[in-house]
Image (cartoon, helix red, strand yellow):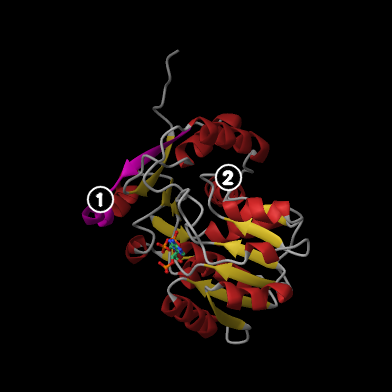
């Protein structure tokens, strides 16, 4: 079959490395579903080339781009406008070119909240225990604060990073109730009875030897336990939570919904969620080799 791409709209993802990304599969499947003449490609952009790559969006007339590690912060310098989320998170994962203007968005936190909603939960008014203080944790924390949760407790292996995240959130959300907890079984145990939602936003769970100082035995039916790791989908945290009667949300939801939001921004169309979920599950089940960055998009 001959494919005529003369009029195709070009999309892509900038990252380094980029081989692991599931975004080309997700978006090309969604374009085909909507019969859109569009192509989404992975671009391995070295850090020294990221400025040239962002400027090429305009020069080449690329319609939309996702951005992943290590470029999420760097790209902001060459964009014309940032969404409120991107500005608060301090990182961009989606660029939309409108004529000559490059608009930057961050759909990671929104994607996470939508995955909660899909599971029938709402973060508003809840007490959340967030594990992690890296880029993913920050995106989720900002969105939780925007979503008016009751209380946010942050635990991280490196306490200073949790304190820095809490301090920066307090600047943007002066009325938010934010605390820092040591990543130790005793201090986490003390917080679990008052916690509604536990979110693992660390990379722990990707590898069999990973271990986290977490009181697994104290998770119970009152908890909603979420993990953003999606390789594997069933992490030790989620397995323990299910065994003890907690509801769980796995990392596929955030992956899927951050992509869905980007697709909506670019095309104004809805992501075909059931189709993309099945496509992702098949890809994850058939990818034999662990990629370099197993949970990053
Ligand atoms: P991301 O952008 O995905 O959040 P990151 O900024 O490198 O990536 O953050 C990784 C997170 O996983 C951090 O919270 C990190 O804790 P530190 O700040 O102490 O490094 C956490 N993490 C990674 N490996 C961990 C481990 N073995 N135990 C506990 N936390 C871990």
Q: Is residue 83 above or below residue 296?
A: below
- Residue 118 in view of the camera: no
Counting from the top left corner in percent of width and height, residue 200 is at: 56, 61
> Residue 225 occupies which quadrant of the picture?
bottom right
- Residue 79 in view of the camera: yes
Q: Indicate the secondary structure of the residue bearing disc 1.
A: loop
Does residue 52 appear left or right of residue 23 in this picture?
left
Instruction: Point out the stretch of residues depicted in magenta.
Output: 38-52
Q: CA distance from mark 2 to mark 1?
A: 29 Å
Counting from the top left corner in percent of width and height, residue 14 is at: 36, 48
Q: Is residue 286 above or below residue 292?
A: above
Whether label 1 lies within 8 Å of ligand 1 gets the answer no
Q: Indicate the secondary structure of the residue bearing disc 2.
A: loop
Quarter of the image where the N terminus is located: top left
Q: Quadrant of ligand 1?
A: bottom left
Counting from the top left corner in percent of width and height, residue 269 is at: 62, 43
Check disc 1 and report the residue beneath it: 46
Closer to the observer: label 2 or label 1?
Answer: 2
Check disc 2 and report the residue beneath it: 233
Does residue 18 appear left or right of residue 134 in this picture?
left
Could you tell me which residue is drawn at 45 percent across and 32 percent down?
A: 288
* Tag of residue 112: none
Along the viewing direction, whichever of 221 and 73 lies nearer the viewer: 221
Could you tell me which residue is drawn at 67 percent across and 63 percent down?
A: 217
Along the viewing direction, whichever of 70 and 30 lies nearer the viewer: 70
* Residue farthest left in this picture: 48
Could you tell me which residue is drawn at 55 percent across and 74 percent down?
A: 154
């Amino acid at each position: 079959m001959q494919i005529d791409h003369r009029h195709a709209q070009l999309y892509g993802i900038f990252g380094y490395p980029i081989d692991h990304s599931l975004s080309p599969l997700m978006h090309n499947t969604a374009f085909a579903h909507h019969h859109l003449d569009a192509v989404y490609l992975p671009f391995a952009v070295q850090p020294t080339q990221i400025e040239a790559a962002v400027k090429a969006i305009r020069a080449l007339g690329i319609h939309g781009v996702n951005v992943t590690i290590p470029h999420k912060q760097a790209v902001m310098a060459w964009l014309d406008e940032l969404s409120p989320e991107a500005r608060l998170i301090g990182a961009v994962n989606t660029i939309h070119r409108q004529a000559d203007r490059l608009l930057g968005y961050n759909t990671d936190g929104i994607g996470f909240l939508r995955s909660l909603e899909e599971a029938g939960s709402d973060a508003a008014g809840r007490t959340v225990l967030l594990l992690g203080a890296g880029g993913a944790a920050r995106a989720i924390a900002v969105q939780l604060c925007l979503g008016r949760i009751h209380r946010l407790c942050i635990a991280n292996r490196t306490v200073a990073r949790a304190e820095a995240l809490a301090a920066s959130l307090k600047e943007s959300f002066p009325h938010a109730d934010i605390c820092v907890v040591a990543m130790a079984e005793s201090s986490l145990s003390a917080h679990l009875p008052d916690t509604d939602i536990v979110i693992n936003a660390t990379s722990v769970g990707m590898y069999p030897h990973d271990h986290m100082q977490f009181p697994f035995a104290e998770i119970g039916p009152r908890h909603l336990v979420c993990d953003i790791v999606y390789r594997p989908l069933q992490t030790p945290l989620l397995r323990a939570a299910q065994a003890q009667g907690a509801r769980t949300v796995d990392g596929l939801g955030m992956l899927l919904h951050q992509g869905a939001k980007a697709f909506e921004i670019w095309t104004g169309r809805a992501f075909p969620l059931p189709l993309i979920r099945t496509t992702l599950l098949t890809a994850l089940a058939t990818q034999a080799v662990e990629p370099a960055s197993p949970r990053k998009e």
